[in-house]
Amino acid sequence: MFENLQDGLSSALKSLSGKGKLSESNMRDGLKLVERSLLEADVSYEVVRTFMKNVTEVAVGEKVLKSLNPSQQIVGTVHQELINLMGPVDHSLHLKGPGEVTVLMMCGLQGSGKTTSCGKLGRMLKQRGRKPLLVAADLQRPAAIDQLHVLGEQLDIPVYSERGEQDPVKVCNNAVKQAKKLGADTVILDTAGRLHIDDELMGQLERIDKQCNPEQIYLVCDGMTGQDAVNSAQAFNQALEIDGVIMTKLDGDARGGAALSVKQVTGVPIKFIGTGEHLDALEEFHPDRMAGRILGQGDILSLVEKAQAEFDEDEMKAQEERLAKGEFTLDDFKKQLKQITRLGPLRKVMGMIPGMGGMLDSLGDVDPENDMKQLFGIIDSMTPAEKRDPKLIDQSRRRRIAAGSGVEPHQVNELVKMFEPMSQMMKAMAGKGMKDRMKMFNQIKGDMMQNPAGALTRKKQGTGKRLSAKDKATAKKEREKMLKKLRKQKKKR
């Protein structure tokens, strides 16, 4: 998602950060690269013009040009303008209280992922304590009714349909009237789509809107269609006055132009984004977090929220208690890594951690999932005593573990070396609340905001000084050494 835009903007901003002193001339040259990156990402031309006008006014201002580090301020300016471009967003679904029925209407073109999004939204509402009812009102596509029933069965959510009925307006009206009898407090209308916008479709949707009086109308847009998604959002909004957009398929190779353009062009915010085929792959859209992802600063808050939803609470509590006692073994390490794999593909998870985006690029074709399985194999080949105290692993034990897990002895040694600082850090965090832990993450993110070029120039903790040229060179050699080793391992496999 947004990979091309992220690469383009990173290159443009790096070209500015590489200058010792910025003048108005080289500032404008760097901003042209920013503009080109946005246009290549299929952002609306008018939106790009407005965006660049706002950024340029600040970027070439006297205050920035005379500041201590103008390039850092440019990053902050682009970040803020991206937020302004996509927000603000009201995530409220305007749900009514007990005893009343809330009606939510979903619309969109065929192929946008509308019916699946109905299921995803129903799942989200159910998790929040609501009792949703899915309504199969898409009579245009024969398989839509069956698809919604299948989703309802998977989610244990009731589905209302009238097979053989030709009037979708009548189906929607009957469903709303039957909602209370069926024990539902939120009705989600899956309306008909078309391959393109036409008068018949709009007339039908307008009648449903008028007779069912939904609290919110959501337009489902396919993020892969670029500016076509923005154009359809405009047309739907003129007819229905939609309250929000659900942008789907942002897990694919979408260039991101639609997501950046839709709010500015239509005035309607993106409320949710679909990030996968699974029914749990629906997220609230946060402009500030998305701006951070686009600029390669990660999205640690979304990662923490996902972790809280996915991780085993009892297991986490047991691990906290062990850490409080100063215990953290390789078995504990393995359990934590297994929980991380529940968050999704490791490359996607790593991309949400500040500073990891650049590392992923440098790793090339290295497969994190395969490396994780290999690591689990090494730990499983150890005795309980070795897992508790890796210092017991001498040369002969190392050879035995390597033979048992199908790796080289030096790889066992690398795991033990990696585990030691991790163990110390985990023990140091024991007993600290989420607030203190988030301070650490926010510090990392703050460093990334100040210096998008990477961690080599990050300030040392507690010294307030930048790394010396000697330290930078040493760090660079270590990184190159690590990458060389990883590539060598991959060739062997």
Image: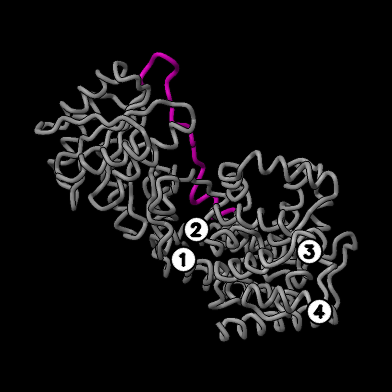
| Marks 4 and 3 in Cβ contact (< 8 Å) | no
Identify the element where label 4 is drawn.
helix
Instruction: From the image, tell me which residue sits under label 2.
Output: 51
Cα separation, mark 4 vs mark 3, equals 13 Å
User: Residue type at mark 1?
Assistant: Leu
Residue at the location (29% across, 51% down)?
Answer: 112
Instruction: From the image, tell me which residue sits under label 3.
Output: 386
Residue at the location (39% across, 64% down)?
Answer: 42
Q: Position of residue 15 (x, y in %)?
A: 62, 76
Q: Position of residue 402 (x, y in %)?
A: 69, 76
Question: Tag on residue 38?
Answer: 1
Please identify, in this view, whether the residue under mark 1 or under mark 3 is nearer the observer. 3
Please identify, in this view, whether the residue under mark 1 or under mark 2 is nearer the observer. 1
Please identify, in this view, whether the residue under mark 4 or under mark 1 is nearer the observer. 4
Residue extent of the magenta highlight? 80-101
Q: Quadrant of the C terminus?
A: bottom right
Q: How many marks?
A: 4
User: Residue type at mark 3?
Assistant: Glu
Mark 1 or mark 3: which comes first in sequence?
A: 1
Identify the element where label 2 is drawn.
helix
Please identify, in this view, whether the residue under mark 2 or under mark 3 is nearer the observer. 3
Cα separation, mark 4 vs mark 1, equals 55 Å
Instruction: From the image, tell me which residue sits under label 4.
Output: 395
Q: Quadrant of residue 292?
A: bottom right
